[in-house]
Image: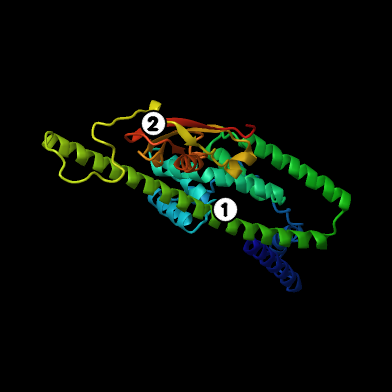
Amino acid sequence: MIVANYDRRDSRLSVVKQVSAALALACALAACGKKEDAAPAADATPAPAAAAPVVTAQNAVSAKVSALTVDQLREAARKAYVENRLYAPAEDNAVEYYLALREKAPADAAASSALTDLLPMTVIATEQSVGREDFTEAQRLAALIERADAQHPALARLKTSIAAGQDGVTKRTEQEKLTAEEQAKKQAELEKQRLDQQKQQQQAAAQQLATQQAADRQAATQRAAEQRAAEQRAAEQRASPAEAPTTAAPERAAPAGASASASDLRAVSTPAPRYPPEALRAGTSGEVQVEFTVGTDGSVTAARVVRSNPARVFDREAVNAVRKWRFQPVPAAVTTRRTIGFNPGG
């Protein structure tokens, strides 16, 4: 825009010089007429710059991002994710890239999964932008959320909060009649605060995602190891069913012939899960069904999420809580399922 303004200014100066030279040299009437016709355009008041368009769900993903190919989007999204550019800056963040990728390749499960992980952080970032009165950023983030999920439960609340915040700021500004100098200083401080907070928040969000993914991988590895051990024991029993064991059983193995079921479990301690702060602030409720195995000593040896609603919001806290549960000793390991509810008003 600045380059364009300079180009127009240079063009107008050039026209004025041409008219002056023509008059001084007493050009032919037709030529002078042409020069004089150009003069009013040079003296005309330039049209005011158009206001920046409001970011909506339709233009939340920039044309620059939408123009990329599927492979370019996939690589740009991966790089932005790794570098903690989860939802900012505009036109160069993981949410925009994954949205464009999902629209160009609807069957790409990785894009949908990544957006599911990123939307809770984007909701929090929108709330924080409203809190610091950065409504332009709040509108951009809300538009990204709407583009990703037009039925998102937090969307209506966020839009109402943005509108109310803008109205409040307008009234306050009118009352206080801030000078241009004061407004410039406030804007500079706001921009610095926004950039610092976004950087810290994205780093924390990335660390949280990495921790959750590492825990999921560890749980999957543990389940696979337990499955392999069970298959090996079953194979050994089929190979020599009548052969008596020649070595002592492991310390925590169940006695021969012993069995137990979920009805044999007697809880000793079942601490409630921690309520995720972001879900509590948003007033989000839900439930998680957890499958877990209780060892012979009554401790929980493995736990995994079977289903959850809403997905991924309460999973980690539910599994963490179940792993701390304790039961009375049982003659053999028992695998069962429990559904844990989360209610902010409960």
Q: Which mark is residue 10?
A: none
Q: Which mark is residue 90?
A: 1
In-image side of 155 versus 182 (left or right): left
Q: How many marks?
A: 2
Q: Quadrant of residue 241?
A: top left
Front tag of 2 and 1 = 2
- For label 1, the SS is loop
Question: What quarter of the picture does the N terminus occupy?
Answer: bottom right
Sort mark 1 into few (<14), some (14-19) or many (20+) by Cα contacts within 10 Å.
Answer: some
At 33% across and 47% down in the image, what residue appears? 221
In-image side of 16 versus 297 (left or right): right
Three-letter residue code for mark 1? Ala
Three-letter residue code for mark 2? Thr
Q: Nearer the viewer, residue 7 or 130?
A: 130
Residue 310: x and y in percent read 51, 34
Q: Quadrant of residue 328?
A: top left
Residue hosting label 2: 336
Report, in whole angstroms, how far the alpha carbon at label 2 lies from the one at label 1.
47 Å
**Which residue sits furthest top?**
263
At 38% across and 51% down in the image, what residue appears? 71
Residue 236: x and y in percent read 16, 39
In-image side of 65 versus 331 (left or right): right
At 43% across and 53% down in the image, what residue appears? 78
Residue 184: x and y in percent read 77, 61
Q: Nearer the viewer, residue 102 or 224?
A: 224
